[in-house]
Amino acid sequence: MKKYVLSGILLIIETLIFYFLATYLDMDNKTICRLLITLLLFLFVFDHYKITSKLVWDEMKSLGKAMVCFFVVETVMLSAVNTKGWFIDGIILTIVMYIVAIFFDRSLRILFRPIVASRTLVIGIGDDAARLGRIANNNRFALTKVVGYVRYEREQISEDLMERYENGLKSGTNFKIFESIEIEKVLEKEDIEQVIIAIPHVSKEEINQLMLRLYNRVKVIKYVPNVNVTMTFNSKIQDFDGVLLISTAQGTLGFIGRLIKRIIDIVAALFGIVLLAPIALYVRHKNRKNGDYDSIIFKQDRIGLNGKPIKIYKFRTMIPNAEQVLEELMEKDPEIKKEYLTNKKLQNDPRITEAGHFLRKSSLDEFPQFINVLKGEMSLVGPRPYLFREKGDMGIYYDSVIHCKPGITGMWQANGRSDVGFEDRCKLDDYYYKNWTLSLDMIIIYKTVKSVVYGKGAL
């Protein structure tokens, strides 16, 4: 019921703004009424007023489709009226209403989240469950409030979940962890509206048993399936005469998509190169102040498109003899050697310069790679440019990664940056290749900028 009220408030706000905007554009009441009905019809068809647990990116995509449909019909209507400047008015009305719809949908969801968010119980305490909880907490647009987790049999708790649990105890904002025997009691006591089963490793029979225990006790049940690496979000679900089939698909860009991506790369590269000059002067000043007169630009061979070597440019953030110092550190300290061989980096690296700490924390050390982007060797968004010595460690993911140009930013930078281990980086880059779309690029750019601004997972 609360969600219907939220939908009603959103509907009223958008209707009023549409009316005042159309009036400002000198449209008559008859035309305004027709256009408003058309707009609301498409918004309802594309579930804009259906307040469900989804991410803002999905809402932006579906709302974009609704606005394209509205613009087509709007153009026909306004051309029939034949008023002066009708085409420009139509563009203004469509763009403004798209921005208004996103802004107020997001704002109202955030404002009313404590009231309308679905009280959710996650069954599982492993990595999948922890990631679900983290996404629910970080994405305020998705109206999901995880109130607790259920330990399934002797399942080991995720380190991430344990850390958040301990931090919650200190701050007084903690969730609860229950045992599987308590499920029925918890559903009633905690007023659970939604259950997410996040134990993909268990058998089909065990999932069925859980479903029977949840049957008629909760409104919504979702579960994380156990899928292999060939699954992507472009895969299709098919009803094959009562048999559920999932067909895999490859999300690759066609000619138009590649052309648009290249245009974006060129524009971004030109803008980035303009910003290089003041940053370069700062780095040069800091290094010389500390007695370091070597080149501020670091060049290194990396794996490029189709496995070909490319020479990438970065601001040098380490002392001149960094490789030699690393060898000495690993020889002296087995723990350092183990950490580097596992993650291909050191968390507290003593080789980083004073300017280097700032550059890495702000990710400005990557800016010279805009030169690589302009040359066509790299893209603004893509997999990490891996070292040739890392090829063996990349395993099965190597063949996927080399089918894309390496990027200045990518999935791993947008999803934790330095908090992500080497194997997980490879998995994220593999995901990018298999689910490659221009809209995904836009999401990655937005999340990377947000991570840099808030310093999340800084290097």
Image (cartoon, rainbow, N blue to C red):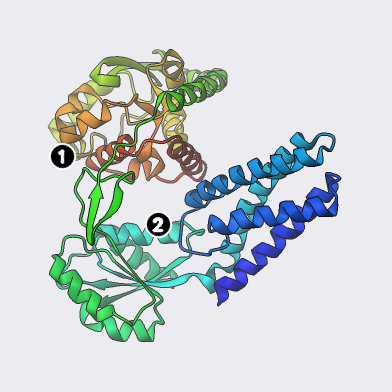
| Residue drawn at 39 percent across, 13 percent down | 294
Up the image or down, 233 lies above or below 268; here it is below
Coordinates of residue 67 in the picture (x, y in percent):
61, 46
Establish if 266 lies above or below 14.
Answer: above
Q: In the image, is 392 to the left or to the right of 8?
A: left
Residue 85 percent coordinates (x, y): 81, 34
Q: Which residue is at 52% across, 24% downward?
A: 268
Residue 270 visible, this angle: yes
Mark 2 vs mark 1: in front: 2
The numbered mark, 2 or 1, whose residue comes first in the sequence reads 2
Q: In which quadrant of the rendered image does the C terminus lie?
A: top left
Report x, y in % for residue 413: 38, 38
The amino acid on which the numbered mark 2 sits, given as a three-letter code, is Ile
In the image, what residue type sits under mark 1?
Lys
Q: Quadrant of residue 290?
A: top left
Whether 227 is drawn above or below 150: the answer is above
Disc assigned to residue 135: 2
Residue carrying label 1: 338
